[in-house]
Image: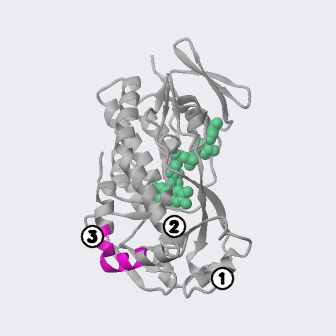
Amino acid sequence: MTKTVAIIGQGLTGVTAGLMLAEHGYDILLVGAKPPLIGGLQLAPNGLEALRTIGLYDAALSGGVRLDNIAITAMNDGRTLAEIPHPQNRVYIGIGRADLYQAVEAKLAGKKNIKRMASPAISIMRASDKMELVLEDGQTLYVDEIIGADGVNGLCRSFVCGAQLKAKTAPYYAMRSEIEARALPRLFSRTQTQLILGDGCHFVSYPIAGQKRINAVFCASPEKLGPEWQAQLFAPHPILKYVADASAQWVKLPLFANSLPASWRRMQVTLIGDAAHIMPPHLAQGAGQSFEDIAYLKTQLQEKPLSDALHSMSILRASQLKSTTNKASLTGQVMRLSGLPAQLRDSLLGLSGAHLLENWLADVWQANS
Ligand SMILES: Cc1cc2nc3c(=O)[nH]c(=O)nc-3n(C[C@H](O)[C@H](O)[C@H](O)COP(=O)(O)OP(=O)(O)OC[C@H]3O[C@@H](n4cnc5c(N)ncnc54)[C@H](O)[C@@H]3O)c2cc1C
C-alpha cells in the first residue's frame, strides 16, 4: 500500500521535500501555512547541485542572478579588503525566496498525491504502527511517517530532541529588506555579493529577480538597532546612505546559535532543514544544506524503503553538517568583532583575505550529492 507522509512546515524545505517525495509516488500531506517570503538566498555549488538532483536546478538558474564575486569592504573607510571571484566553473547565484518557492509550487501544481492543509500541527503521538497528528482546526491524521520541516523552534524538534534542544536566540539580529533596484545606485545591481564589515555589525547585499530587486541584510546586536539605527549607522556611510534613503521596509529576525542534534529521528518522525540543523546565516548555507538533506534522501530512496532512507539521511547528514554549522558560527563571531580585534580582522583580510576565505569555504561549497 502507498505510504502516507505528513510534512510539517510549508517553508522552502517542506515544499521541496514534498515535491521530491510525491515524485517518488508517496501520498503527501503538506501541513502549515505558506510563510511570508521576503528577500533572497545565495546558493553556492553545493546547494545548486542538490537542486539538480531534486530536479530544480534549471528553475533555480533561470529565476536567479548569477553572481561573479564576493566583494568585501571595510565599513569605516570603504577600502577593499578582499574579492573572491567565482570562476566560470563555480556557479553561485542570488535568488528571491518567493521566486524559488514559486518554481517549486509550479511543479507541485496538479500533483494528485499532494494535499495541502493550512492549519498548523499541534500534537504528535504514536498510534499503533502509525503516527497520529492533530491539527489546530481539529483534524486528526494517521500517517506512516512525519517529516519535521517546521523550523528552529517547531513541534517536531521538541518531539525528536526534547525541549532542552530548543533554539537559543543568539545576541544578534538580522534586519532584512528587499528593495527596488531603481531606488538605489547601479552599484547595488552589480552581479556580486557585497559584504561590508563594520564594528560589531555587517551589511550584505546582492541582486535578485533579474537584477530588478536588491536583497539587503544588516546584522548587528540589539544595542545598535535602536529606533534611529538607519540614521545613525547608514546615513554617514558613502554607500549605505542610499539604502537609508530608499525608505526600505525592514524585517527584524533573531539569529540563532548553531545547534545540531546527534539524532534527527525518533519513532517515525524525522527532522529536515532548519528543524534539524540550526546555524547562523553567515555562510549563506541554511537553505543550501536543506536541499542537500532532500537530495541525499532522494538518492537513498533509490535503494531503500522510506523508513530506512530517512534513518540513513538522519545519520549521515547529522555527521556531514558538524563542520559547516561550526564554521557558520565561527564566521559569525569574526563578523561580530569590534574595536581593535575588528581592525586586526580587516588588516588580515586586506593582506590575504581572498586566499583565506577560499580555503575556509572550499569544503562547504563542495557538492555532496
Ligand atoms: C538573514 C538570513 C539570511 C539567510 N541567507 C541565506 C542564504 O543566503 N542562503 C541559504 O542557503 N540560506 C540562508 N538563510 C537560511 C535559510 O533562510 C533557511 O535555512 C531556510 O529558509 C530554512 O527553511 P525551512 O523551510 O527549513 O525553515 P523555515 O523557513 O523556518 O520554515 C518552517 C515553516 O514551518 C512552519 N511551522 C512551524 N511550526 C509549525 C507547525 N506546528 N505546524 C505547521 N507549520 C509549522 C513555519 O511557520 C514555517 O513556515 C538565511 C537565513 C537568515 C535568517
Q: Residue at x 43, y 35 (%)?
A: 262
Q: Which residue is mark 3?
A: 87
The amino acid at mark 1 is: Asp
Viewed as shown, does residue 366 lie left or right of 130? Answer: left
In percent of width and height, residue 47 lies at 38, 53
Which of the labelled discs sits on residue 235, or is there none?
A: none
Kindly report which numbered mark, 3 or 2, lies closer to the viewer in this rendering: 2
Q: Which residue is mark 2?
A: 336
Q: Nearer the viewer, residue 174 or 120?
A: 174
Q: Mark 3 or mark 2: name the one nearer the start of the chain.
A: 3
Q: Kindly indicate whether the residue at mark 2 contacts the one at mark 3 (C-beta within 8 angstroms).
A: no
Is 247 colored magenta in this rendering? no
Verify CB contact (< 8 Å) between mark 1 and mark 3. Answer: no
Q: What amino acid does circle 3 point to?
A: Pro
Secondary structure state at the residue bearing disc 2: loop
Callout count: 3
Q: Position of residue 242 (x, y in %)?
A: 60, 83
Q: Is residue 307 visible?
A: yes
Q: Is residue 30 visible from the viewing direction of this image?
A: no
Q: Is residue 255 above or below residue 74?
A: above
Residue nearest the viewer, comparing 103 with 112: 103
Few, some or many residues within 10 Å of mark 1 (<14, 14–19, 20+): some
Colouring: one colour
Instruction: Report the magenta residues as a range.
Output: 345-356
Numbered disc 3: secondary structure? loop
Q: Residue at x 55, y 11 (%)?
A: 128
Q: Which mark is residue 245?
A: 1
Residue at 45%, 20% in the rendered image: 2
